[in-house]
Image: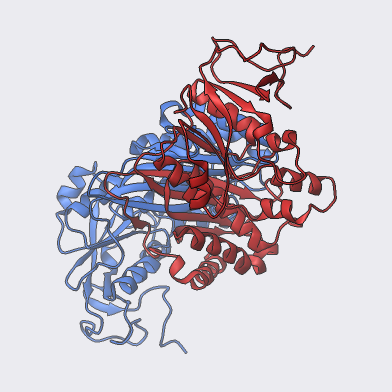
Chain colours: A blue, B red
Amino acid sequence: MSDHLAMGPGREFDAVRALLAQWGPLARGVGDDGAVLDVPAGEKLVVSTDSTVEDVHFRREWLSADEIGWRATQAALSDLAAMGAAPLGVLLALTVPRAWREELPALASGIGAAMQQVGAAIVGGDVTDGDRLALAITVLGHAPRPLSRAGARRGDTLYVTGSLGGPGAALSAWLAGSTPDAAARARFARPEARIAAGLWLAQQGATAALDLSDGLAGDVAHLAAASGVACVLELDAIPCVPGASVDAALQSGEEYELLVAAPSLDTAAFAQAHGGLELTAIGRVEAVGTPPSGGAPSGSVQGSAAQPGVVRAERGGAPVALPGAHDHFAP
Amino acid sequence: MSDHLAMGPGREFDAVRALLAQWGPLARGVGDDGAVLDVPAGEKLVVSTDSTVEDVHFRREWLSADEIGWRATQAALSDLAAMGAAPLGVLLALTVPRAWREELPALASGIGAAMQQVGAAIVGGDVTDGDRLALAITVLGHAPRPLSRAGARRGDTLYVTGSLGGPGAALSAWLAGSTPDAAARARFARPEARIAAGLWLAQQGATAALDLSDGLAGDVAHLAAASGVACVLELDAIPCVPGASVDAALQSGEEYELLVAAPSLDTAAFAQAHGGLELTAIGRVEAVGTPPSGGAPSGSVQGSAAQPGVVRAERGGAPVALPGAHDHFAP
């Protein structure tokens, strides 16, 4: 852990020492100004930073400190999963208000459990005082050929891992003042970065991927725009958690499932390789400007050939409006 | 920039877009879940995270937003300098309270200027809301043979770059309610990570290095402890900024100068290669247990052979007490 703690070092040094003692061999390379890591020869370094902040990304009464640590770490690692990268390590910048100080061991326990799950180490970070709990987590990974959002090609199939709608349902319940059901709550509180899935998908020829942190509707638009293609979603195929509608699944963010484009994937082999986690074909990639099958009904969302990044929806092969999306034809 | 902004994306997305527009080509690889970088073949990856937080590391009335951005970035980069690493890029996790939002372009300008100075790119990050301005900066670098604190050997000379005492003088003035003189203030507000110096020193055979973020007295103790050696400081040799005493220079933290151990270095060649920046021999490395020259006077600070990491002070070759250090012989 770095030690730039100019104006009040005592408390923060103590906090860092306690964390290092708790993490044991999970924290490595700590003591010098920086940590030293090896990127395997011929591979690329993949990096991302992701912050989880109290009252922005969660409220204290929703989650235990252990869950907050786990979730923040998995959310950050999810960016590596989306790039088809294997984790090298993480760096943590923790802002810990006085009111959270007693919860620091529980927070560290959640962070440590997440790191242990993916088999990577905590290689640096710092702890500072502040008014709101915040975890800024930088993840480092490596990949021979990192996936981007920009590689999807006409003719690819669109796939999604897992089932969608859980985090959205939990969030809706909390924001309405009620209690989410246990399954939805677990999807929000205990996400798992799809690291192994991302590695498998990259190896099997995926052309583009991203995680569903903004929700499927938003993220498929990101993929379409980055790749300059039209993405056609078959709404009836979208895998939803029990009780979640397709509309809700499309809007549910913080999913940490992967959206992937690939020529063709063996979904049964995927499930077998990932403990039953499902990979579901939910649509296809077309060239921008391809006319919708059956003609567009009034109210459908589509772009023109001049506007890359189009998302269209179908039900049973017939074009329908994309729920919740901006409607160019609305009055 | 990553885009996990679950509960209030609009403002933060806008902030990220504005930052990217301002930074232009200084921000690279942004758009995917992670950025992709190359570590040169045969070299190590060096990483560190460093946070600068309002009211912990600075007060708003002390610095302009541009200076805060510059200083936080240089402070983070300083860890690469201390490791003898060349910068690859940085990731920024910015917490920007409402009261700071109008200052974001100035903050970004300082960050950008610092990145431009070292010729590295901003490769990721995020912006979140919060109650206190905080910049958590992760730096990535590469080095064929990173320097550590642990490599100092008996017979090495101790060197320091630049002159010490400026940041401490500025801080003392501010904390006493007065105005620091311009030179001391500049040393606090406009530090420069000694990147080129670190590379030169590593190449010239330095055995250990660290930056003086805790001040020379504290950091020489870190070096001695990590290397398991005795460090002997010649107090009269310590380069001080005008007006700073040796005692003040020893305690002044946030210096971002480098403390280096090396068999022997050409200080004139160093100065010539670094625009006149001085490299000054300030002491030597001995085995733990070496008797002090001339015998220890009452009040000197020393350890026993069983306790590694000893710091001793001399004036004109005669042992003296190390100012400000814990005195084992005090009543």
The image quadrant that residue B108 belongs to is: bottom right
Tell which of A101 and B142 is nearer to you: B142
Look at the image and tell me whether residue A241 can be seen: yes
Residue A196, by quadrant, is: top left
**What percent of the width, then of the height, locates residue B214?**
63, 37
Between residues B155 and A321, which one lies in front from this camera angle? B155
Is residue B291 positioned above or below B49 on the image?
above
Looking at the image, can residue A180 be seen? no
Residue drawn at 42 percent across, 73 percent down: A324
Outermost residue on the bottom side: it is A331
Q: Is residue B79 left or right of residue A224?
A: right
Closer-to-camera residue (A159/A23): A23
Which residue sits furthest right?
Answer: B177
Position of A89 with respect to B177 (left or right) is left
User: Considering depth in this image, is A312 or B253 the residue closer to the camera?
Assistant: B253
Residue at x 41%, y 49% (from the top left corner):
B141
Which quadrant would residue B106 be assigned to in this image? bottom right
Using the image, determine if residue B113 lies above or below residue B280.
below
Left or right of residue B136: residue B318? right
Q: Is residue A257 left or right of residue B317?
A: left
Q: Position of residue B71 (x, y in %)?
A: 61, 54
x, y percent for residue B63: 71, 58
Q: Residue at x 74, y 33 (%)?
A: B247
